[in-house]
Amino acid sequence: MTSSSLTEPPPKQAATELVYAEVVVSFATAIGLFVFTVVQLLYRTTRRARRLWRAENQIRFDGAHFLSKPEGNVGRKIIEIGLKEHENKEVKPPSFVLPAVVANDRDVRADCLSMLAETRQIFRKQYGDSACLMSMRCCLSCVENALPSSQTEDFLRLYENVLFGQHRVDGISDSLTNDDIKFLYAFFHNTILKEIQ
């Protein structure tokens, strides 16, 4: 017998050791993948729960919080004064005449005001009388996580352009096309109303 034949294990024992090593490696890999999957699922679940919690608890315009305070509270007085002012407010015409925005024999400006009134009416159920003071931008900020942000910003830009005759930020007046007005109606009725009702 040579020395090399003494050190080499028999072929059956080598095959058994190889199978055993493969089983151990496969088992360790399976456990590692299972742990990784569980950690990923827990991380995603807690991250989503944190986002939802933040969206639910973020106070954007909650006048009900102040209206529930005692009579002498400063915050309650401010909200009540605002509600009274808004109630008795006289609509004064602007210092210059805004051109009428008419499409398909409809006054788009009047339709924008009715959109705002409808949105406030829906939010009044959740926020109380303070919803009467909310602008369209404020209303939509309450559901901003549920709406596509770029389309919402386009809608608000067109809405404010129709209602005020200018953009909110840069003050540049744009000409509105029929497609813009169609988008205004379609996005409000098909997306915003479905989301907030």
Image: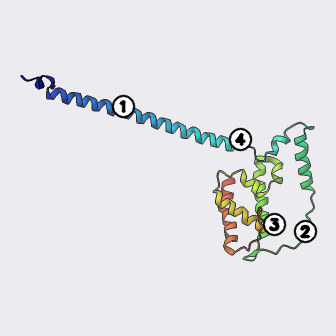
Tell how many labels.
4
Whether label 2 touches label 4, CB < 8 Å:
no
Mark 3–mark 4 Cα distance, whole angstroms, equals 32 Å
Q: Identify whether 166 is placed above or below 9.
A: below
Q: Residue, x 23% and y 31% (percent of image)?
A: 18
What secondary structure is found at the residue carrying circle 1?
helix
Position of residue 30 measured from the top left corner of the image (x, y, whole percent): 37, 34
The quarter of the picture where residue 173 lies is: bottom right
Q: Which residue is mark 3?
A: 164
At label 4, the amino acid type is: Asn
Please name the residue that numbered disc 1 is placed on: 28
Which residue position is annotated with label 4?
Answer: 57
Residue 111 appears in the rendering: no
Task: Say above or below: 38 vs 170.
Answer: above
Q: Are there few (<14), some (14-19), or many (20+) residues within 10 Å of tag 3?
A: some
Nearer-N-terminus badge (4/1): 1
Secondary structure under the numbered disc 3 in the rendered image: helix
Foreground: 77 or 7? 7
* Left or right side of 36 for 146: right
First along the sequence among labels 2 and 1: 1
